[in-house]
Amino acid sequence: MSSAEFVSSRGASQAAPSGTMNVRILRTGVDRQIQKEDRVAVEAPLEYMLHHPALGIEPVSFGTTMRTPGNDEYLAAGLLYGEGLVNHAADIEAIESSTRRPNVVNVRLNESAHMEMQLATRRFSAGSSCGVCGTTGLDAAIARAAATRIADTETVDLDLLLRLPDLMRAGQSKFADTGGIHASALFDFAGNLITIAEDVGRHNAIDKLVGENLLAGRLPFREHIILLSGRASFELVQKALRSGVAVLAAIGAPSSLAVNLALASNLTLIGFLRPKHFNVYSSPERLRPAHAWLNDSQASGSKRSRPE
């Protein structure tokens, strides 16, 4: 097949439901090339417009981020909650997609919502992999997160944690379609999947998860686990701390600042979660049986090793 023919065939790309898009690809191997249909995750901008009496008559842009369309109201609510602009569902009067401009969401805040003007008028442009990109108050964000203290809770079974990645994967409909999308899943200490959110941006996925539960009146979390499909960065630990969750587990690695925040806040942080092992970076006493497991780990040196 010629290049011209392949380029022409790409015009057949079309939007598909659930934040994915059908595209025409050339599957290429050593022996042959085959044209076929594939599906990719949609990535599109979303601008947040804030309406609040303190901002005046005209709405103020809180910024733009790249996301997978769908559940934009949850994304907006979770982002504003994570940034500290809202603290309760009652702070939000309404969240509506603009009828005049595509990829714009209007967030109407109640007058009772207290707003720091510098934060409210901050403008940023963030990619789908970015959490606090463009934030001018990074020091304030770190200080706020470090001051959080997760309350003591009941313990959670180690075996239960090992089962969570398979449970999350089974609920990832967009990942099954595209192989290129992140997820955040919420479980209780009994291992029940409460809800799951998917997005091309890993920060967006946890914002959608938190936003849904904020609007449903289920925050703060307590004896719950958030599982991330990727790594655990500072921004994701910050968002987890804001939600009040007791355990944050990640399929990937944590960063140094993520570990420091978890240690300071009594959050149980788990990385490299696999079907047979994982690393615990903070508050292992929340895991059952913690002492026997820690003794075995220290004897084998596996606690500090990177899983294969």
Image (cartoon, grey):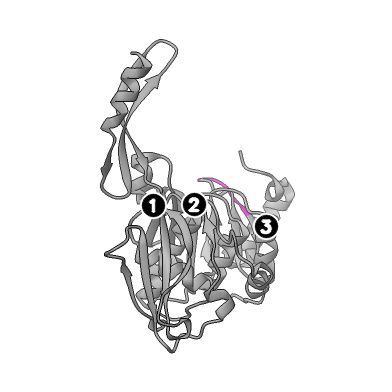
Q: Nearer the viewer, mark 2 or mark 3?
A: 2
Q: What residue sits right under mark 1 in the picture?
A: 68
Relative image position of residue 306 (x, y in whole percent): 66, 43
Q: Quadrant of the N terminus?
A: top left
The foreground one among 1 and 99 is 99
95 vs 293, left or right, is left
Identified at 55% across, 59% down, the residue is: 131
In primary-sequence order, the first of circles 2 and 3 is 2
**Going 59% across and 75% down the picture, which residue do you hit?**
150
Q: CA distance from mark 3 to mark 1?
A: 40 Å
Q: Which segment did they paint magenta?
A: 275-279
Q: Which residue is mark 3?
A: 294
What kind of secondary structure does the magenta stretch mostly adopt? loop
Q: Which residue is mark 2?
A: 128
Dot 1: within a 10 Å radius of its alpha carbon, few (fewer than 14), some, or many (20 or more) residues?
Answer: many
Helix, strand or loop at label 3? It is: helix
Examine the rendering and report whether any part of residue 283 can be seen: yes
Which dot, 3 or 1, sits closer to the camera?
1
User: Which numbered tag is attached to residue 76?
Assistant: none
Seen from the viewer's position, the closer of residues 66 and 87 is 66
Asked which quadrant contains residue 67, the reply is bottom left
Q: Give the amino acid type for the residue marked by disc 3 in the picture.
A: Leu
Q: Secondary structure at mark 1?
A: loop
Q: Is residue 150 above or below residue 131?
A: below
Residue that lies at the very extreme toward the top in this rendered image: 31
Residue type, numbered disc 2: Ser
Between the C-alphas of marks 2 and 3, the distance is: 37 Å
